[in-house]
Image: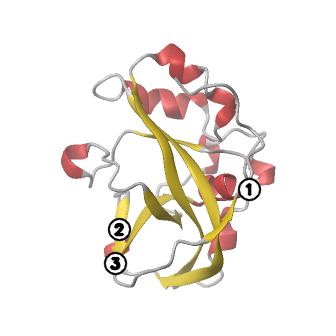
Amino acid sequence: MTLVFKEWSYIVDALGKGMQCILLRKGGIAEDEGKFTLKGNKFLLMPTLFHQAAQMLKPSWLPKLNAGRFYKNANEVTIEYYAEVALQRKLTDWETVSKLDDQYAWKEEVIAERFHRGEQNVLLIVVQVYQLQTPIAIPLLAEYGGCKSWIELPQTIDLVGKPVVYERIKGTYF
C-alpha cells in the first residue's frame, strides 16, 4: 500500500514548481473527529479539485498555476510528486502564522478562517517535494473522494525522484 495526501491541484502545482514548500492544515469533515493528523512522513501528493476555488488564492499566484494539468481525462488523475516531511509544528499564535503569508498561495482570509475555527491553531508542515521518475495515473474511485486528507492506494509505488528546488524559502518557520 502507498499513503496518499490529497491537496488542491493548485497547491500541488505550486509545490511541484518550487513556489511553495509548506502546508497549513486544520482538518476536514471526514477527518478523525474533524482534526487533521499527519499519517506519515513520506507520501504521494494527489491533486484534487474537491473544494478547490480559484478565488481563495492570491491573484498574483494564479497566472503561474495550472490546476487542470493533472486531469487529462475525466476518470483519472495524474500524480507527479511525492513529499517528505521536514518539519511539523502546531502554530498557536496568529502573528507567527501571518509572517508566513508570502510562502503560500492561499489568501490570508482562507488561512485565518482555518486558524480561528475551533481552537486557535493550525498545523504547519514543511515538506521537501520530489518529482516522481515516472508519473502515475490513478482512477478516480468513489472511495478516494470526499473531504478527507488521506487515502491509501492498494499498490506499492516506489517513492523515488528528483528533488524540487524552492524559490520562496525564507528564514525559519516558527
- Asked if disc 2 and disc 3 are in contact, CB closer than 8 Å, the reply is no
Q: Is 159 situated left or right of 117 in this image?
A: right
The answer for how far apart the CA atoms under marks 1 and 2 are is 24 Å
Q: Callout 2: few (<14), some (14-19), or many (20+) C-alpha neighbours within 10 Å?
A: some
Asked if marks 1 and 3 touch (Cβ < 8 Å), the reply is no
Disc 2 marks which residue?
151
Residue in view at x 63 percent, y 62 percent: 130
124 sits to left or right of 137: left
Q: Residues within 10 Å of mark 1 (few under 14, many from 20)?
A: some
Residue 77 appears in which quarter of the rendering? Answer: bottom right
Number of marks drawn = 3
Where residue 143 appears, x then y in whole percent? 31, 75
**Residue 17 marker:** 1
The spot of residue 110 in percent (x, y) is 52, 34
Distance between the alpha carbons at the discs numbered 2 and 3: 10 Å
Distance in Å between CA atoms under marks 1 and 3: 27 Å
